[in-house]
Image (spheres, rainbow, N blue to C red):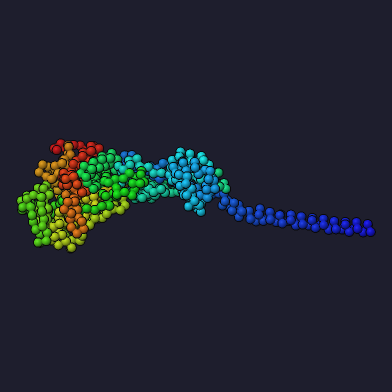
Amino acid sequence: MKAASALVVREVRGWRNLLVQGMLAFGAGIVLVRAFELQILQRDFLAHEGDKRSVRVVEVPPHRGAIRDRRGEALALSAPADSLWTIPSELLAAPEYLPALARLLDMKERELKDFLTERSGKQFVYLRRQISPEEAARIMALKAPGLFSQREYRRYYPAGEIAGHVVGFTDLDDRGQEGIEASQESVLAGKAGARRVIRDRTGRVVEEGEDMQAAQPGQDVLLALDLRLQYFAYRELKAAVAQNRAKGGLVVVADSRTGDILAIANQPGFNPNRPEERASAGLRNRAVTDVFEPGSTIKPLLIARGLELGSVHESDHVDTGKGVWTVNRGLTIHDTHAHGVVDLATLLAVSSNIGAAKIGLQMGPEAIYTGYRNFGIGTPVTAGFRGEANGVLAPFARWGETGTATASYGYGVSVNALQLVRAYCAIANDGLMPQLSILDQQRGETVQRAISAGVARQVRHLLEGVVSDEGTAKKAEVKGYKVAGKTGTIRKNEGRGYFENRHQSVFIGMVPAEHPRLVGLVMIDEPAAGQYYGGLVAAPVFANVMEAAARMMQLPPDPSS
């Protein structure tokens, strides 16, 4: 009995051993098969999945090109900056870091906590953009979970408001929004690169890899602008606007031979280094975007066209009567004083609207229209800015007698400041109208001939009388140089008519008158301190700015002045 029992026990134990061994062998087989599958068959897939959780490709921002003036002075530069971002849920899970972090961010702890809570479902939230690397390092020293930094570039404008309208500014993502920053975005921006990095489980970079694609820096942009003259023009304009309690104003100075825009200043202004000023009324570059009726400043273009056609001659005289003249019973034209019979030089010197209207009606609308178009009125300048206004020069068939008369002394026509400067550059440059540009670059042939060289010299000679004791712009005299120019005192249009007491005071002229090199325009918008005539308000600004410009350009003094 005992022997039989022992035999049964041995058989059961043997069966159990075999079962256990079989199960172990089966388990080992499964492990081997799974290991083979993972290590051999799925190796590439698993490696890729692991990389997705630790290896990242991050964008490497390019260095934006600088903007410089014609002498290489910096107008816009990029400096290294850091931006802080967070995964809100991870930061909220470590509330002990919030008080110190809030202090460094100049926030209240409650404010920071509410900010993070509202965005707790997001995986990427900026805390601060474009702060100094030193400030970012102090904040990152907290080693708060879910807090990260990334390198960017911050734009800085050394000239501030002096060149704000020209240079413009970029947004937080370093994209140009206004001025040269916007118009030359494709040149300045460069191309972002890519770099492979390894992050730990919290998302922190633990190892920098090699660049997969190097960032391509943007190119510098060189302007025709002279920062020295720009500063002087801005200072004089700002002072004149304040002195005359004006709404605003502008100054443009150009090289009449090359078309280089040497200065372009506006008021009101803004400082591009201050984001809070970028939505202000001073953002607009009025010399480019705003149009105005040129008033009497268009009379030299009218006279030039008449001389070119032979409709008038330099020795001709016009009877302006007693200073009041009615056209076609629908338009009464006034001069400031009764001048009687005047020659062309006196007509321009005293700025007779009646004289200009009579010459214009004698020439006819088609002749005037063609002459204005030859001077570029109504056509864009394309000087390197975005948002340029074209102005208005209606088809001559619509003018009639009234339209022809008013167009002769600068009403019913509108221009921007650059268009008027370009037209006067043709008079200064012996009839050849250059391509105006704010960019310092190779230029092609002169765009067009507006008038003959002989007529241009005649008109310049006539315009010298405007800046004399007998003319309307005695205050435009530039010490050491003869000046040829023209005043304009323009009543502003209110839509259905003209304001009685809102004016734009304008002076545009050239230096030296005999062989001009510089053309300058000054416009003061709605002076309200009493005086509003162009010869009294705008002409003094012209004199100060052009004296500085002549000195900076080292123009030889005129011995006969």
Image point 28% across, 40% down: which residue? 231
Q: Is residue 14 left or right of residue 61?
A: right
Pick the residue in front: 245 or 162.
245
Q: Give x and y (percent) for residue 457.
A: 15, 47
Pick the residue in front: 73 or 540.
540
Q: Is residue 558 left or right of residue 325?
A: right
Image point 44% across, 45% down: which residue? 128
Image point 72% across, 56% down: which residue? 30
Image point 93% across, 57% down: which residue? 2
Q: Is residue 344 left or right of residue 112?
A: left
Classify residue 228 by image quadrant. top left
Q: Give x and y (percent) for residue 40.
A: 66, 54
Q: Give x and y (percent) for residue 103.
A: 46, 41
Quadrant occupied by the C terminus: top left
Classify residue 539 by image quadrant. top left
Q: Residue furthest front?
A: 110
